[in-house]
Image (spheres, coloured by chain):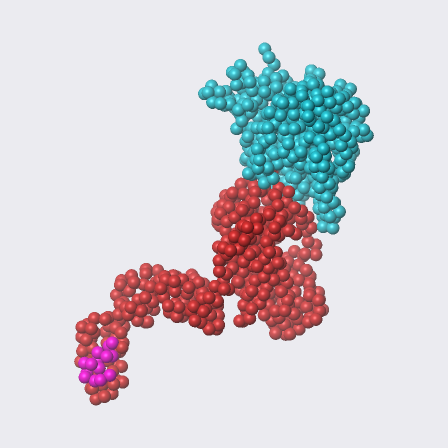
Amino acid sequence: MTTTLPAYDDVVARYEPVIGLETHVELGTNTKMFCGCPTDFGGEPNTRVCPVCLGLPGSLPVANKAAIEATIRIGLALNCSIAEWCRFARKNYFYPDMPKNFQISQYDEPLCVDGYLDVEVNGETVRIGIERVHLEEDTGKTLHVGGATGRIHGATESLVDYNRAGIPLVEIVTKPIPGTGALAPEVARAYVTELRDVIRSLGVSDVRMEEGSLRCDVNTSLNRPGQEWGTRTETKNVNSLRSVERAVRSEMLRQASVLDAGGRITQETRHFHEDSGDTTPGRSKETATDYRYFPEPDLVPLAPDAAWVAELKAALPELPRLHRRRLQLQWGLSDLDMQSVLNAGAVELIEATVAAGATPAAARKWWLGELSRRANEAGIELADVGATPSQVAELQGLVDAGKLNDKLARVVLEGVVGGEGSPTEIMNNRNLEVVSDTGALTAAVDEAIVANPDVADKVRSGKVAAAGALVGAVMKTTRGQADAKTVRELILERLGVQS
Amino acid sequence: MTDLTRLTASEIAGLVASGDASAVEVTQAHLDRIAAVDGRINAFLHVDTDGALAAARAVDERRAAGDELGPLAGVPVAVKDVLATRGVPTTVGSKILEGWRPPYDATIVKRLRAAGTVMLGKTNMDEFAMGSSTEYSAYGPTRNPWDTDRIPGGSGGGSAAALAAYEAPLSIGSDTGGSIRQPGAVTGTVGAKPTYGGTSRYGLVAFSSSLDTPGPCARTVLDAALLHEVIGGHDPRDSTSIPAPVPDVVAAAKLGATGDLTGVKLGVVKEFTGEGAEPGVTAAFREAVDTLTKLGAEIVEVSCPHFRYALPAYYLIAPSECSSNLARFDGVRFGLRVGDDGNRSLEEVMSLTREAGFGPEVKRRIMIGTYALSSGYYDAYYGQAQKVRTLITRDFTAAFTQVDALISPTTPFVAFPLGARTSDPYQMYLADLYTIPTNLYGGPGISVPCGLSEGLPVGLQVMAPTMADDRMYRVAAALESAVGTFTPPAL
């Protein structure tokens, strides 16, 4: 598409977006959804398979209780009602990476329904309605070989890896989200971020978008104010939080340009392209497959015991939003300061650093200062910067004990990030400890006075400010390892001047 | 010397246990019989000579070592080709699975092996168990040992004919709408459909998941019960398997064999007498009812008004499930692949494979099922059929408040000539008219020979409440004790 796109501000002035998100989360259970095969990521192709997940004739599924439990916990964390009785259903369509040519999913009887998730955007709380949370099995992966793009078009052969087939997958579907206006892209991102944090706090998935354990489809439509909601498109291949935001924005701009030109939006699946930031059409939903859903006859209905559900609810961990609020109070941060901590992705890092003994202020200083700078420069996540919370706490401990000053501490931190060892080891190995031996310092001071007689005279005659040059000289000979304040006091004392 | 192939399974087990016959001798006798007659019967799709003899030797070695043997150790069994057998071809009577050797054993096959039975091979069947004559097998029809120009029933015609032809004393069948009982009736053998969930479906190539029930076939009621006991019981690999012990079917068969049915109340299904059945079948059934009365049973007539809707409901539910179950046969992972010449698309290869691999009856049912599940038609067809299923279940539960078990002829007609009903699917479907309600309900049913009509066997069906399989064995064994077993003319 080479059409010139309208300006975003113009678009949101003329149109109202309605968005919706369908998120798939691969659960971190030990075994697959309907068989005992392991779920770990990355094995050689077709090594984590058995007759059941290969869909061999005669094989039968048996539901994984741990996956059902995890799904119920997600539903509870999203304020859903848990079905007293529900069933799995078959979704029938032919695709080679789907071993049985149907997917065991849930249709009109999902496990969890009608909940919500509160997210914060620019300090405002937006309540996102949750339509349903259901459980299904993942498909395998098809690799198209020989084509230019890795897509099926032009490929000479297709290879299928069934390792992923049958991994439990939770689908979380929002209700349509109207009324967010210009903030729609940010709301979408904030929702996926919050959802990721909630699921991570439950410990049921590693929710890594880059490994595909969190996948997101974004529905977008535009309508003129006061008119009915427009036709929606579904954008797939949205593989990062940033892409969620970009995909909504890009689709809003594209749809506006189509509507502006008097065109109509086709209900279709579109693919998001990370590099260009735009979307291209995939398969049209208007000729969509009839999935012929019907209740899965190989499985018995699920009827979670009410007492069990109550137990799971009572045992839910503190959810991220409440957790953050509690930390903000404990750390004494303003909303703005807390926001910058959140934006830096530093909440858990600071929390762990405080737990390892640092004060909140010191922990925040390191993570938002020196370490954020390094992460930004390297273009990596803060958590991957190379220093751990316990190392940061140890470093701060050395500063607090007077063994390192700020400048030396930064040198030590560089060593930590470079993998030289613990802060104490680096300080000792590189001999960076503050010189606190007054004998050695006095010698250095006397040396500086002798070497700079003119300056010494000025100080003696009352120009105390001139002592700075002598301090500098001492710091130079001690390679910065002296405490400047102590040095200054010593100089004045040796020159017989009252400080 | 005794002809080992003429013995019952319990007699063979006795000889093997006492050392009067070795399992290898027994097995060899049956392999020889198969070699002699199966060219005329075509009961077997695959004879596993080496595997059978190895299994027999293992039993003999265990006996020699003084190990305790199970009640059927050393007894040969023929297995319907619908069950996955590790390393042994499993075709389901279809071209689409030609050459497939499963990497795993069905639970029932595992239990047969663990019990020391000797698997002779795999028996012929209507393709994917869809049919009532075994004429829809992709590997040629099986012929009825009573008259080789007639059908042996279906879909499990191979398992029934193997018994009637003395090629095996025991066999395994699967019953979705009558595929164990109707072949049993027309070959003069015993076929039992256990309670749904009473026998594991793991490894049974699915036709209709909510109806498929594997079960025992034998020449006597006691043998069927002994086999039932070996294969039955809970299997954690099958979610629909019932977590309860197998009812004591062997004790029930032994009790029935005393010929005393005093205190047993039986209901004749009103809707299954009279019209529809051949006069000879009706006559044999009436005579059997008199016999049961003489054995002490109280007989009443019971109306099950919704049974007349069983056939149409079945022909929506079973095809719907089959259309989904058979989707996996696409040439990608196993079995036949057609048209993969490097130029055709994946979709084309899938289509060509299915077109070449499935026979006309299978295609017909896939199409019916696909239609019945389609958006906009689901409620009118699949949804409505499920409601009928509920009503039929209510008929059964209401009947069982009045009687201990229901009885009817097993099938409206005796073995018909080959080709007589293949041109009209509905005429073929009528063969299962009396057996289908039990599948929709999920209860057990057994067919036991009750007499002859124009020289051909007639079966009587006993239907019992779910998990009361023992009741039907008692009634069947009592009738057998009075009327005896039926031997076909020499081949």
In the image, residue A185 above or below residue B318: below
Q: Which residues are magenta?
A: A486-499
The chain letter of the cyan chain reads: B
Q: Residue A467, image x and y in percent?
A: 25, 82
Q: Quadrant of residue B341?
A: top right
Q: Residue B223, image x and y in percent?
A: 61, 23
**Magenta region, main secondary structure:** helix
Q: Is residue B189 visible in the rendered structure shown here?
A: no
- Residue furthest bottom in the image: A461
| Residue visible at 57% across and 33% down in the picture | B245
Between B467 and A180, the one nearer to me in the picture? B467
Q: Quadrant of the C terminus of chain A?
A: bottom left
Whether the magenta-drawn stretch holds residue B390 is answered as no
In the image, residue A275 above or below residue B81: below
Q: Quadrant of residue B360?
A: top right
In the image, residue A239 above or below residue B11: below
The total of numbered circles placed on residues is 0
Q: Residue A452, image x and y in percent?
A: 20, 82
